[in-house]
Amino acid sequence: MENLTILRMFFCFPLVGLLLPDAGILLSNYPGPVPVIHVVIEAALLLCISLCTAAIAYSKRKNQDQTNEASFS
């Protein structure tokens, strides 16, 4: 589970690195659009982060259920 947490953290770094310039483009009067490749990469990173989060939540729930079963026995 620690590995998934670290992996999720390292997926966040490039996401923030791409979102900052894209937010600057959107907030400024720059006439050009946000590059499509940035949107694709950001969507892929968000998907990876959400998968890691779901795996972490599943692992915690599984461990919690096992702990509850052991305490009732």
Image (tube, helix red, strand yellow):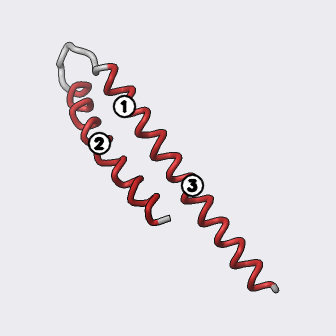
Name the residue tied to disc 1.
41
Residue nearest the observer in this picture, 37 or 24 = 37
Q: Earlier in the sequence, mark 2 or mark 3?
A: 2
Q: Earlier in the sequence, mark 1 or mark 2?
A: 2
Name the residue tied to disc 3.
55
Question: Where residue 6 appears, x then y in whole percent?
Answer: 38, 59
Residue 14 numbered mark, or none: 2
Q: Residues within 10 Å of mark 1 (few under 14, many from 20)?
A: some
Q: Secondary structure at mark 3?
A: helix
Residue nearest the observer in this picture, 26 or 4 = 4
| Marks 1 and 3, how far apart at CA | 21 Å
Q: Secondary structure at mark 1?
A: helix
Q: Residues within 10 Å of mark 3 (few under 14, many from 20)?
A: some
Q: Quadrant of the C terminus?
A: bottom right
> Residue drawn 43% across and 34% down?
44
The answer to the question of whether label 1 and label 2 lie on touching residues, with beta carbons closer than 8 A, is yes
Q: Secondary structure at mark 2?
A: helix
